[in-house]
Amino acid sequence: MNRQVEVLADVNAIVARSLALILERAHQAIAERGQFTIALAGGSTPKPLYEAIAQQPLPWEQVHVFWGDERYVPPTHSDSNEGMARRAWLDHVPMPATNIHPMPTQAADPAIAAQQYDQELRDVFQVQPGEFPALDVVLLGMGDDGHTASLFPHTDALAVRDRLITVGNKDGQPRLTFTAPFINHARSVFFLVAGANKQTALAHVFSETANDEDYPARMIRPQGELWWLLDEAAGVKQGV
Ligand code: 6PG
């Protein structure tokens, strides 16, 4: 694992730095493989990044967008990660609808929806059961409890090793989420973390002694690049 940790002045600096790094990787992926695949994080931190990406002159027909997790609500719901990314980015660029792969949230049983998305990814990437496709970029946030995607502390999702997608659980509310092994197959993983309220969890994530069940972001140890882009409020005193 190639881990880079950067403490930047503020969220704007995180957006500028992550945008530059993502664009580099997008152009490289398109040059080498003819397409760029990215999984989006939800929550609030990445929204300005999505707004910035929308301003870039990328070959949108060669960009494919997935979600690393989703609240189990319709895309019209204010909590929807899909809705946020469409309003901030995807509604503003000429990306073919077939390039946009939202997590399905219509099935009555979230476990069925997880299987549907797992199969959709296998079809898109042409991988067999037991194989994990490598996305070019996976964007992640981290909650103040150390969760990432919808891999919450002490939940069943943390133990799922044989699938791409599983059902997460936030205080009894179902989520859909990438599994840790799927995230770890990405070429580049970017954590965007801002705010003093993340300091304590970050210290445990970076420590030698904490355990993954308590701080699931520790489970993200990709074979490729791992970037932690922190603002000063989150990153100060981390000694990183
Ligand atoms: C979600 C996210 C989640 C998020 C963290 C941080 O669906 O909420 O994917 O993992 O990244 O909770 O959220 P903030 O960026 O809002 O602090």
Image: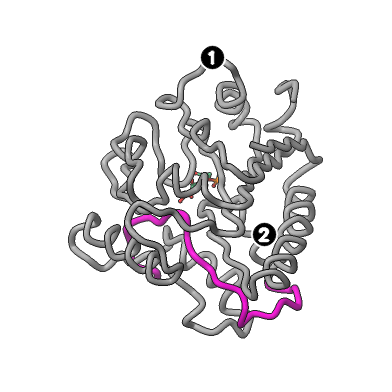
The three-letter code of the residue at mark 1 reads: Thr
Is residue 117 or residue 94 the one in the foreground?
A: 117
Whole-percent x, y for residue 166 in the image: 32, 50
Whole-percent x, y for residue 126 in the image: 42, 68
| Label 2 secondary element | helix
Residue 188 is tagged as none
Q: Which residue ends up furthest to the top in the rendered image?
A: 209
Earlier along the polypeptide chain: callout 2 or callout 1? 2
Crowding at mark 1 (Cα within 10 Å: few <14, some 14-19, many 20+): few
Quadrant of image for the C terminus: top right
Q: Quadrant of residue 75?
A: bottom left
Q: Quadrant of residue 3?
A: top right
The three-letter code of the residue at mark 2 reads: Pro
> Residue 22 colored magenta?
no
| Number of numbered discs overlaid on the protein picture | 2
> Residue 69 colored magenta?
yes
Residue 48 is tagged as 2
Q: Residue at x 27, y 60 (%)?
A: 115
Q: Residue at x 54, y 66 (%)?
A: 85
Is residue 8 or residue 28 the one in the foreground?
A: 28
Whole-percent x, y for residue 104 in the image: 33, 67
Q: Residue at x 50, y 48 (%)?
A: 183
Position of 152 with respect to 91 (left or right) is left
Crowding at mark 2 (Cα within 10 Å: few <14, some 14-19, many 20+): some
Q: Quadrant of residue 114?
A: bottom left
> What residue is shown with label 1?
209
2 vs 1, front mark: 1
Whole-percent x, y for residue 28 in the image: 74, 65
Q: In the picture shown, does residue 219 fall above or below 229? A: above
Question: What's drawn in magenta, residue-wise?
Answer: 54-75
